[in-house]
Each structure stands twice: as structure tokens, then as C-alpha cells.
Amino acid sequence: MENKGLLEKSFVKWGLYTGLALGVLTFLLYMIDIKLLVSGWVALVIYGLVITFMVLSARQERTEGGGYLSYGKAVLNSLGVNVISAIISILFTALLYNVIDPELPEMLKTISMENMAETMESFGSSEADIDNAVKMAEERQVEYDFKGLSMIALISIAMNFVIGLIVSIFTRKNPPMFEANDTEA
């Protein structure tokens, strides 16, 4: 098997696709209704996209590897997709939150706190517990500067790494331990 340059590796291509897809999805959701940006259903769609692109990258890598892909290589492949897509997503988020709409982070925080209060109320939480949780959420300050976005990227990479470990179980394919003999004894 010949050595490919970095830009020719499947995880680079699929990482770029994943990052661009997440960026476009975020922008579309922003244009449709900003409440969608903090929706649990949207989070599931995002994880579905990430998993799909990890699987597609691993399948390409396995095909290029003669039909086989070790678990370790599958994990590295999904990690590559993960890191590249996180970098692209964070760059887009920085652009959206700092240039396009600097008030968006505060609006999303308010919407998230309202959603949290409604959810807690639906589970029968007391008014005091809801007020305490909202107060704690208000005190949490996430900065969308380079440091804050870097932390978000690291958390995203860690969470998606766990997903990549699981995806790799299903996308790996080891060569047989013993080759079948063409001649019968």
C-alpha cells in the first residue's frame, strides 16, 4: 500500500465534509429560528451526522486498505474526522458569535435557562429548586473568545472521541488469522 499525503487521507476529506455540514446546519438553524440552536433534537441530528461521516470515512479507509481496517486505525481515523470537524465548527461558531451576531450567545443562554426551567417544572421540581438552578446557570459565564472556544472544542473532541471508540468497533475488520488453503489434504 502506498503512502498517501495528509490531504489525501480519508479522515481529512470526511472531517472537512463533517465540519462544513455542521457549519451549514448551524447557519440554517440560525436563519430559521435561533431556538433550534439549543434544541435537544438538533443535538441528536448533529451526533447522527458526526457518526455517519465517521462511518463513511472508516469505510473508505477499509476499502483502500484491501478490505481490512484494524480497530486502532479505525479509532485514529474517527479521531481525525473529529478533530478536523471540531476545528471547522469552532471557527464557524467564532464567526457567528463574534462577528455576525455578537448578541447571540446571551440570547441562547436565556433560551437555555427558560428551557431548563420548563423541563424542571414538568418533572415536578419545586419553585425554589428551579430558581436555584436558574441562578447557578446565570452565574456560569462562557466566553466565546479564543480560550472559551478552545475549551468548547476540547470538550466536543472528548465527547466525539468516545463515540468514535464505539463506531470503530463496528467499522473495523481484521484479516483472517489463517488463510484458507486452496488444496485439500
Image (tube, grey):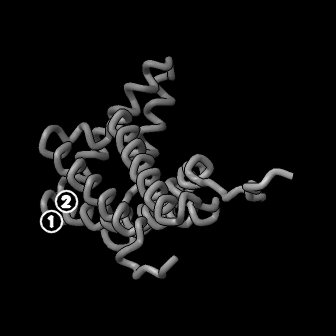
Q: Residues within 10 Å of mark 1 (few under 14, many from 20)?
A: few
Position in image of residue 155 (x %, y %): 49, 59
At numbered mark 1, what does the secondary structure look like: helix, strand or loop?
helix
Nearer-the-camera pick, 117 or 61: 61
Nearer-the-camera pick, 124 or 73: 73
What residue is disc 1 on?
99
Q: Is residue 14 left or right of residue 95?
A: right
Q: Amino acid at mark 1?
A: Val
Nearer-the-camera pick, 68 or 56: 68
Position in image of residue 173 (x %, y %): 62, 54
Q: Is residue 26 above or below residue 90?
A: above
Tags 2 and 1 touching, CB below 8 Å:
yes
At x 41% / y 47%, what residue is drawn?
52
Position in image of residue 49 (x %, y %): 37, 46
Position in image of residue 34 (x %, y %): 20, 42
Q: On the image, which quarter does residue 116 sit in?
A: top left
Nearer-the-camera pick, 131 or 172: 172
Q: On the image, which quarter does residue 39 sit in?
A: top left
Q: Is residue 9 left or right of residue 27?
A: right
What residue is disc 2 on?
96
Using the rendered image of the protein, determine whether residue 139 is visible from the camera's viewpoint: no
Q: Gap between marks 2 and 1, in whole Å?
A: 6 Å
At x 49% / y 19%, what residue is drawn?
123
Q: Is residue 63 left or right of residue 31?
A: right
Q: Is residue 52 above or below residue 89?
A: above
At x 48% / y 37%, what residue is drawn?
132
At x 25% / y 51%, what residue is drawn?
106
Q: Residues within 10 Å of mark 2 (few under 14, many from 20)?
A: some
Q: Is residue 163 left or right of residue 33?
A: right
At numbered mark 2, what does the secondary structure look like: helix, strand or loop?
helix
Q: Amino acid at mark 2?
A: Leu
